[in-house]
Amino acid sequence: MMTINDIIVLLTLIIALIAIINEKNRTHLLLKFTKLDRWLFGLALVLINYFVFYQDFEQKDWVIHSLYFHGFGLHQPRHWAYIITLISLIYLFYKIYGSFYAKFQIEKVNAFYSKQIENLELSFLIDLIERYHKNDIIQWVSKNPVNNDDSERELEIDEPETWQVKVGIWWTGFIAGLFPLSWNNRSTYARRVLHSIINTPGFICHAANLRPYFFPEIYMHLTAAQHDQYPDELINSFFNELLRDKNYWLKKELKASESFDTGQPIRFHEENKILSGLLEDLTVSAKSKIWQSFGDTAVHELQEEIQKGLDSPLYQEYFSDNQLWEFKTQFSYQFFKILIIEAINKQHNGQHFWLFYYDRIIEKIIKAWEKNPPVEDVSKTVGHKFIENIFDTLQQWLEFANEKEHTGLYCDITSCIGRVLQVVNESAQYPEKDKIRMLDILFRTYCNLADNGQTDTLRTELEKVIKKPNNLVEAGFPYYGIVAKAWDQFDKVPHRVQDFTDYAYFGRFKRNVIQPLGLPTNTH
């Protein structure tokens, strides 16, 4: 038989459950309870007391006569108290672990989340977002179709709403209000949390380094969304924070990418989610203009190094790549390297990924040297190594683009090479031997290109750049003296047969480049 003590134990369990929940959790859980829920729990408590003490009420005639009849409920009225208590407990567990916020609570929920940012309770807030909203955000973003017809969208906005549209809006709101777990309600919360919480500077600033893998799980799905449906600056803001602190996890992934010169394997994407979200589908990088974060960070860092003078680590003698990784510029260099490789691999067109950042990096290093020349007895500084790596990477891109016949990047890469040649040859501080080395590498790249259907196109672009690196280059520019020395030192033997007859590509090189520059073609 159910006794009053049994009922008290159940009620105690309910009260204890509420009491052990800490204040933060209790606050957000209470947001799940509507006024109706509170009325129901209040009514349940009244009924439990009524049925537990029913006989006492009956003796004093303190009963609700309309509910009174002999043998009420499972032989004993207090049995109903047990059933109501059990139902209340089950419903309480459901509200805590299985329910969702009601539609009309959205402003309170948003305010509560914002308060967690102010209190720096980011770990707790991210846990809540991952539990209640992250999957909905991903689903909402993925469900939004791409719509590039802006004029059609504007036309639809200007048209008056029909009664069918009004009914549809009302019905959507009704379903969202009546059923908190409905997609209509959850998608509304997903949009609000994405734009008003996740995309705020305070959240990104603290969460980027605290939980860096929270963001990639979202932005890797943004490609399927209509461009104006998600925050344009979210990805850039996230990477700005990672780069500002030279985040360990970003550095780890970038260093892991050094092992692969022709694209990242599946294993890399599985283990390195921060970069994978940008590389697997390059429209993420294209839409977010991610190169701005990496490029601007490198340029600003080098501008600060200029102010340091000879105290800058750029002037240190180069011993190992660990010195390079002390710079944010190395983060940017490596990211651009793998980004263009992936663009070539995937035949991605329509974006040049702002390759001019490579020549801007070199330009800043050169400016630092012009202000404070390097010490002469240092054979190779960290700054020299940066320039050397960048130029070598440009040659790697050329060869790989030729291999994949990706003509869309030929002009962009060769233009960047031309700008680099102009910048270094304008500088009296950049060693002549290194200028000659650049041209020697460029000559060898031209000659060693594997022939395919598009190689002639690429060689034509290279011929233009070697003859005139940039439109600003005029006759008498020091560059042409370096070209003459590079040509004189260039090893021509591998490009001729035994009787000194030129291979076709080498004969073309002399006709289209060497002769127009007024250099001798019959040297051995």
Image: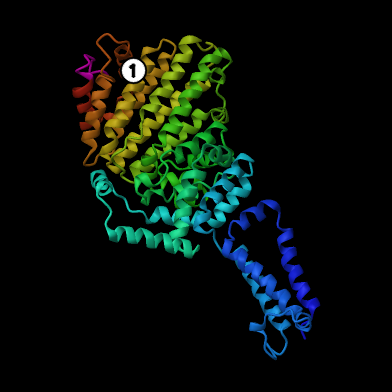
Image side of residue 220 versus residue 328, left or right: left
Residue 161 drawn above or below residue 203? below
Give how far across and how far down residue 374 sits, in percent. Answer: 51, 12
Give how far across and how far down residue 254 sits, in percent. Answer: 50, 39
Per the image, the residue denoted by label 1 is 422
Determine crowd level at label 1: few under 14, some 14-19, many 20+ residues with C-alpha closer than 10 A: many
Amino acid at the residue labelled 1: Gln
Q: Residue at x 40, y 32 (%)?
A: 393
Q: Is residue 308 magenta?
A: no
Q: Residue at x 44, y 28 (%)?
A: 296
Q: Is residue 268 visible?
A: no
Q: Is residue 415 visible?
A: yes
Q: How many numbered discs, if any?
A: 1
Instruction: Give the quadrant of residue 121.
Output: top right
Q: Is residue 519 magenta?
A: yes
Give how far across and how far down residue 364 sits, in percent. Answer: 44, 19
Give how far across and how far down residue 441 sits, in percent. Answer: 36, 26
Nearest the viewer among 7 and 252 is 7
Image side of residue 75 versus residue 404, left or right: right
Residue 419 drawn above or below residue 210? above
Instruction: Give the quadrant of residue 19.
Output: bottom right
Span of residues in magenta: 514-524
Q: Residue at x 39, y 27 (%)?
A: 357
Nearest the viewer among 468 and 291 is 291
Q: Main secondary structure of the magenta part?
A: loop
Residue 7 drawn above or below residue 366? below
